[in-house]
Image: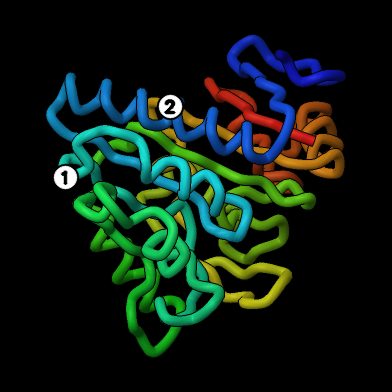
Amino acid sequence: MAICNLDLPSQVTGLSLGSPEQLAGELAITVANALRAAIDTRGSAVLVVSGGRSPVAFFERLCGQTLDWSKVTISLADERFVPVSHADSNEGLVRVHLLKGEAASARFLGLYQSAPNLEEAARLADAALAELGVIDVLVLGMGEDGHTASLFPGSPNLEKALSATCSQRCLPMQAPSVPRQRLSLTLPVLAGAHLTLLAVQGLAKLATLADALAGDDVAAMPIRAFLRRPLEIHWCP
């Protein structure tokens, strides 16, 4: 069922689910099917996911999907500049909720690097991401301020990260909430994904999405950069 009251561009499709559990299940099936197709075509697949607490149910459903996980590389759209053992680590979340069972055989390429400062960590992550290759499936989330990944409105590096000519794969970013120091993939890397999915829950974020669709200022709401290219939105109330 289409997402109610949203006038979506022709290249964007929307699916309305009844509950967070249904959203997690449908998202897991969609991602697994796309990964299987990539493995069948090229012999391998690349999945990039977002962190935070919202994707936990999706991770739990995805790891139970049947596919050749040994041929899948998983990475993150963004990361917090905290050790993997920290409660706020996106990598830690993925390792606990996704990289288990058969899915534990997937290769994981993390963004966090132990470094004296955020800038050096971003430089090291940028070098490591040379091994990532083109993203087959990208799963994004969205904040009520219109940010996605760690592309936050007002972040000092936002303009560079959103530039189509940005040569860096990862940049240091600043969030308005703790932990403020973040690492984010840049738009050229994210926009190169073969399939981009956006998972959104709740009426507040539906209103944010409507605001994003109604305007053009990408810096004010970075999610707009993805609403002007092929995108599948999964939403539940």
Q: Describe the element under mark 1 as helix, strand or loop.
A: helix
Assess whether mark 2 and mark 1 are in contact (beta carbons under 8 angstroms): no
Residue, x 69% and y 26% (percent of image)?
17
Quadrant holding the N terminus: top right
Relative to residue 81, is residue 32 depicted above or below? above
Residue closer to the observer: 157 or 117: 117
- Answer with left or right where residue 171 lies relative to residue 39: right
Give the Cα separation between the discs numbered 1 and 2.
Answer: 20 Å
Taking depth in this image into account, of 139 and 122 the one nearest to the observer is 139
> Disc 2 designates what residue?
195
Is residue 126 visible to the viewer in this orientation of the structure? yes
**Image point (62%, 66%), residue name:** 156
Give neighbour class at mark 1: few <14, some 14-19, many 20+ (Cα, 10 Å).
Answer: some
Binning the other alpha carbons within 10 Å of mark 2 as few (below 14), some (14 to 19) or many (20 upward) gives some
Residue holding disc 1: 70
Secondary element at tag 2: strand
Question: Quadrant location of the C terminus?
Answer: top right
Amino acid of disc 1 = Ser
Of 225 and 3, which appears nearest the observer? 3
204 and 99: which is toward the camera:
99
Instruction: Judge from the rendering whether residue 149 lies leftward or rightward of residue 20; answer left or right.
Output: left
| Location of residue 190 with respect to 216 vertically, above or below | below
For residue 119, above or below residue 201: below
Residue 149 percent location from the top left of the image? 56, 52
Residue at 49% in and 81% down: 86
